[in-house]
Image (cartoon, rainbow, N blue to C red):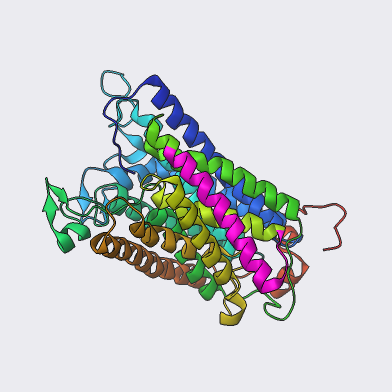
């Protein structure tokens, strides 16, 4: 998230604080999106996983997440010292009792709030690959470990001046040299293609493999139990994404306006592209496809929102929507139970957006394409390896799976002693 403005107004501060609130809304919106996509017996648990992620990440971010992501003492370009700003020490007010100013000249607390919400939604995204079959305690433990060992280091690597940034000590500088004490070819990740979507999508894939399939996967049909709730969740995600992307301009300026337009253009084109694929493949467009397609477009444009113009964003989004739709259709063939299509929507669309932007950016070329591919693959590999270690450790210590009986009868009552409906709908 590059900061281009040197002077900030109260309007800029207000816009970023509002953007943080919009991004915060995205986690409850995701709970609705996933809850509606789940079976009626798993709805509350699915929504609780998003809320739990928001709670766990908030606490860890204040304690050590900000320090690990944006601390001044980098450890090998991978992560910063978690104790430097532990508990936001010296980051909110200075010794004189004045608010600490950030790089944008408004209070640093606003930047902390904004970045906290990114960490929360990134962690919550992963839950979609685990619907209906894991212990709530295992999920809570995973949230704390994953955000600490995967997300915070990646945020440092990309946005905190680490290995995947544009710094003079980054991989890009090693590949193509430096200019003016920075990488000559700077990677582009405007709002989180690598940090958020590639990392979360990869983690979802790893967990789906380690945890295993639901009962009946591939032999029985599991339908979303409430499509209107899915569409409401998707609509709120679209609304919140303006904070995600346009807020990453860190000012109420032209760049924020362009990012807003690009976000809308990509979401719209991806939704239509997904529906076109459904028409050719299945003969009918679906409401679930419209909701999933627009989210895939939002994912695809996230790294590119500040680097393209609306026309290019239409193309980027359309390709991302089509690729995600095709990828989601392959999960039964490959036998991986990614319950709510996190891999197709977030990993595939995130990879395309991060790499594909190199075809459209103003300084597009082979070198930028190589840099974008390298940061995407390194982020994917890092997330896969560390997530795999976390998943196996939790499997050994806590165990991931609920009992077969509880899975059959419904995880909502088994884990929470609640049900979403007093009178169950037919599905």
User: Between 108 and 251, which is closer to the camera in this rendering?
Assistant: 251
Quadrant in which the C terminus is drawn: bottom right
Question: In the image, is residue 170 above or below residue 330?
Answer: above
Rendering coords of residue 298 (x, y %): 51, 51
88 is higher (above) or lower (below) than 119: above
Q: How many marks?
A: 0
Image coords of residue 152 (percent x, y)? 36, 52
In which image quadrant can residue 146 be found? bottom left
* Vertical relation: 327 (above or below) 420: below
Which residue does the image show at 48% across and 39% down from the upper left? 260
Q: Quadrant of the image for the N terminus?
A: top left
Highlighted range, magenta = 258-286
Q: Quadrant of residue 140?
A: bottom right
Q: Find out whether residue 264 is within the magenta segment.
A: yes
Left of 344 or right of it: where is 187?
A: left
Camera-nearest residue between 211 and 395: 211
Residue in the image at 49% along x and 38% along y: 243
Residue 135 in view of the camera:
no
- What residue lies at 68% left-to-right and 67% top-to-bottom? 279
Residue 237 lies within the magenta run: no
228 on left or right of 209 = right
Q: Which residue is rendered at x = 75% and y = 64% of the image?
A: 410
Q: Is residue 40 left or right of residue 291?
A: right
Position of residue 388 relative to residue 137, above or below, is: below
The location of residue 108, given as percent across then percent down, is 34, 30
Q: Position of residue 11 (x, y in %)?
A: 42, 22
Q: Is residue 261 visible?
A: yes
Q: Nearer the viewer, residue 46 or 243?
A: 243
Tell me which secondary structure the magenta stretch mostly adopts. Answer: helix
Q: Residue furthest front?
A: 311
């Amino acid at each position: 998230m590059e900061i281009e403005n040197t002077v900030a107004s109260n309007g800029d501060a207000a816009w970023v604080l509002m953007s943080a609130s919009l991004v915060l809304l995205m986690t409850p919106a995701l709970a609705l999106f996933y809850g509606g996509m789940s079976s009626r017996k798993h709805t509350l648990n699915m929504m609780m996983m998003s809320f739990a992620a928001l709670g766990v990440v908030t606490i860890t971010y204040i304690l050590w997440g900000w320090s690990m992501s944006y601390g001044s003492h980098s450890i090998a370009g991978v992560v910063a010292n978690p104790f430097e700003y532990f508990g936001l020490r010296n980051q909110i007010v200075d010794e004189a009792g004045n608010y600490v100013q950030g790089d944008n000249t408004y209070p640093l607390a606003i930047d902390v709030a904004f970045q906290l919400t990114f960490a929360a939604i990134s962690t919550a995204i992963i839950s979609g690959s685990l619907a209906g079959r894991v212990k709530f305690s295992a999920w809570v433990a995973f949230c704390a470990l994953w955000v600490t060992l995967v997300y915070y280091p990646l945020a440092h690597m990309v946005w905190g001046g680490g290995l995947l940034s544009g710094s003079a000590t980054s991989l890009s500088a090693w590949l193509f040299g430096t200019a003016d004490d920075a990488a000559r070819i700077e990677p582009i990740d405007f709002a989180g293609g690598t940090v958020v979507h590639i990392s979360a999508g990869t983690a979802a894939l790893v967990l789906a493999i380690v945890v295993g399939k639901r009962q009946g996967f591939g032999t029985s049909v599991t339908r979303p139990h409430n499509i209107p709730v899915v569409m409401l969740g998707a609509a709120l995600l679209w609304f919140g994404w303006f904070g995600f992307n346009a807020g990453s301009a860190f000012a109420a300026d032209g760049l924020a306006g362009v990012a807003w337009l690009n976000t809308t253009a990509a979401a719209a084109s991806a939704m239509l592209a997904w529906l076109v694929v459904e028409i050719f493949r299945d003969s009918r467009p679906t409401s679930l496809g419209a909701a999933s397609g627009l989210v895939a477009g939002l994912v695809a444009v996230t790294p590119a929102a500040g680097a393209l113009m609306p026309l290019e964003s239409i193309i980027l989004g359309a390709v991302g929507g089509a690729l995600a739709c095709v990828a989601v259709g392959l999960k039964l063939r490959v036998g991986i139970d990614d319950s709510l299509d996190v891999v197709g929507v977030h990993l595939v669309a995130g990879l395309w957006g991060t790499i594909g932007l190199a075809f459209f950016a103003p300084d597009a070329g082979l070198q930028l394409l190589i840099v974008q591919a390298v940061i995407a693959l390194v982020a994917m590999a890092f997330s896969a390896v560390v997530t795999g270690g976390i998943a196996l450790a939790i499997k050994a210590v806590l165990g991931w799976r609920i009992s077969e009986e509880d899975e059959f009868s419904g995880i909502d009552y088994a884990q929470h002693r609640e049900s979403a409906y007093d009178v169950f709908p037919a599905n």
